[in-house]
Amino acid sequence: MKEYITPPTVQVPQETNITDLLEQQVLADPQRPLFARQASPGQWTDVSSSAFHEDVRTLARGLAAAGLEAGDRIGIMSPTRYEWTLVDFAIWYAGAVTVPIYETSSPSQVAWIVSDANVRAVVCETARHRTVVETAIRQEQLDPLVASWLIEADGLDELRSLAARGPDEDIMESRRTAANLPDLATIIYTSGTTGKPKGCELTHGNFAELSLQALGTDLAGIVNARSTTVMFIPLAHVFARFISVLALAAGAKVGHTSDIKQLVPDLQSFKPTFLLAVPRVFEKVYNSAQLKAETGGKGKIFAAGAQTAIDYSKALSDGKVPLMLRAKHALFGKLLYGKIRDAMGGQVAHAVSGGGPLGSRLGHFFRGIGVNIMEGYGLTETTAPVTVNVPSAVRIGTVGKPLPGNGVRIADDGEILAQGVCLMRAYHNRPDVTEKEIVDGWFHTGDIGSLDEDGYLTITGRKKEIIVTASGKNVVPAVLEDQVRADALVSQCVVVGDNRPFVAALVSLDAEILPGWLQQHGIAADTPVEELASHPVVVEHVQSVVDKSNQSVSQAESIRAFRIVPADFSIESGQLTPSLKIKRNVVLKDFDSLVEEIYAAPKPA
């Protein structure tokens, strides 16, 4: 199949904007808890729709009193927290445009965003963030900001105080309602795996209509007024931002946490019914459970239970679960699966995965233990989801069918094209790139994939990342990288070999898993990674992982050599984007000597 378009399920009035979603919640039930704030560890306090609405309106009037006009761009530089969403809605209620800035951004990155988007004010979490912004403005000699406020220094209280001098209610209401579906709501800058980040102009329709279309499917059975979730991935990323609006549109209750180290305790106290995460989080849950079992001498039980979960899920897909398998599954449900679900709070039945490929193995495993992961596909340019698996029609290994109002087309060279209510209106200040990437309403995603006969999309890899070896063999790195990275000890894998005689890989070790793994294998837990890179036990283990991965490809595509890098890839080093995608060009530059060492050695047999 070359094209699949899903018609809209609901008709959304043209004058709708994102703020109407909150207005509808207040009208439907002013006491409904839309959020929960954590006053102290494990203690959550509900925030009703009416309380959130009142504070949003107050902050919006404060922004207006500070001299910010309708259409002005206001930056938010903060990790994920309740106040992020509070300020986001206040900006929309003031008729302005939100510009997210990752809290890990450098001064040069901030300068580019502030300049390109013409940001006039920022709300930062801490003084450190504001210093980064001020440094960026000073170094690039940009125009000074109208104002900046700190979340953790009573900056929002300052805005609330300003509200008393703001415009009257009629003026503020006219500012709130001025935007329609086609109007600009936010400029989100791409993660920038290559080149300078591009600003994606996303509209009120992109968020509001796409949310309402999604809730017109049986996703509404997961995200609704009885649902709860904990938001922990960056709200500066389009995926979390869309889910945040979707949850509010559905009346679901949202908690926030920015400290990943506290994620498990927060999940256990909040007890969410659904989660959203990038694949790496699900890999961590699996790997941690596996290592814990092996350390406790129960590795064989875990392995058998994991395989049973996978077999059970596959049998569900086939439409028939044999009696013996059903009995084994029930046994492991008591021995193993419940404990893994308890680590996620005990109530999670569904999860949404995006931002990268999950892989069939993890998809089947989690469904087999009772957590149905619905994998989806999208980009910043498509407001996150173009496609998603919905509960009644999950096809593991695919990223689902287009959401209502969206369409997917496969070009002759395999590139995925997307269109519909999800698609941004343009790249900010880049008409040349917009014209090149959006042709006749279809956005060229740069990803390659295929559609099956029922319209389910499968992602193969990135078009620009296809490796062509010296012998002319085309290799899609993602296939091998996903399988190598699935091992508990491995954090990241980057396949190399463009214009080289064979395919090789750079592998990093998982710092969280490493100490326990080393102890289990009789190696001192504090052994430096630099030494482990050549330690025979570690190298032998990674080689076994590579050998297993190679079984899925031809010999010409297989990884013939690898090197373990002396430090894991990180956001701080610039090797990962804030959404944990690998910046391949940065990694290859930083570890150029290791790559050259691989190809300087005799060619592997």
Image: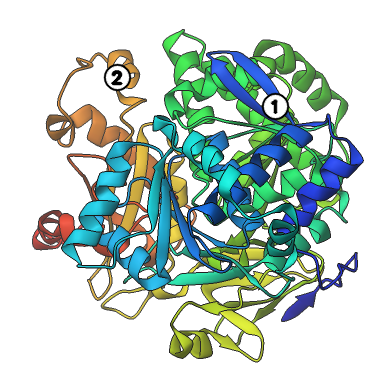
Which structural element holds mark 1? loop
73 relative to 412 in the view: left or right: left
Q: In the rendered view, tell whether residue 399 sits above or below residue 360.
A: below
> Can residue 494 be seen here?
yes
Q: Position of residue 218 (x, y in %)?
A: 87, 49
- Quick one: which residue is furthest to the top in this view? 296
Q: Are marks 2 and 1 in contact (CB under 8 Å)?
A: no
Please give the name of the residue rendered at 32% of the width and 51% of the height, measured from the top-left corner. 105
In depth, the one of 251 and 324 nearer the eye is 251
The amino acid beneath tag 1 is: Pro
Q: In the rendered view, tell whether residue 551 sits above or below residue 298.
A: below
In depth, the one of 369 and 567 nearer the eye is 567
427 relative to 25 in the view: left or right: left
115 relative to 361 in the view: left or right: left
Please give the name of the residue rendered at 44% of the width and 20% of the height, measured from the top-left corner. 291
> Which label sits on residue 260?
none
How many residues crowd around disc 1 within 10 Å: few (fewer than 14), some, or many (20 or more)?
many
The residue indicated by pointer 2 is 515
N-terminal-most mark, 2 or 1: 1
The amino acid beneath tag 2 is: Pro
Q: Position of residue 103 (x, y in %)?
A: 37, 45
The residue indicated by pointer 1 is 272
Which structural element holds mark 2? helix
Q: Position of residue 408 (x, y in %)?
A: 70, 75
Please give the name of the residue rendered at 42% of the width and 12% of the height, measured from the top-left corner. 295
Q: Quadrant of residue 112?
A: bottom left
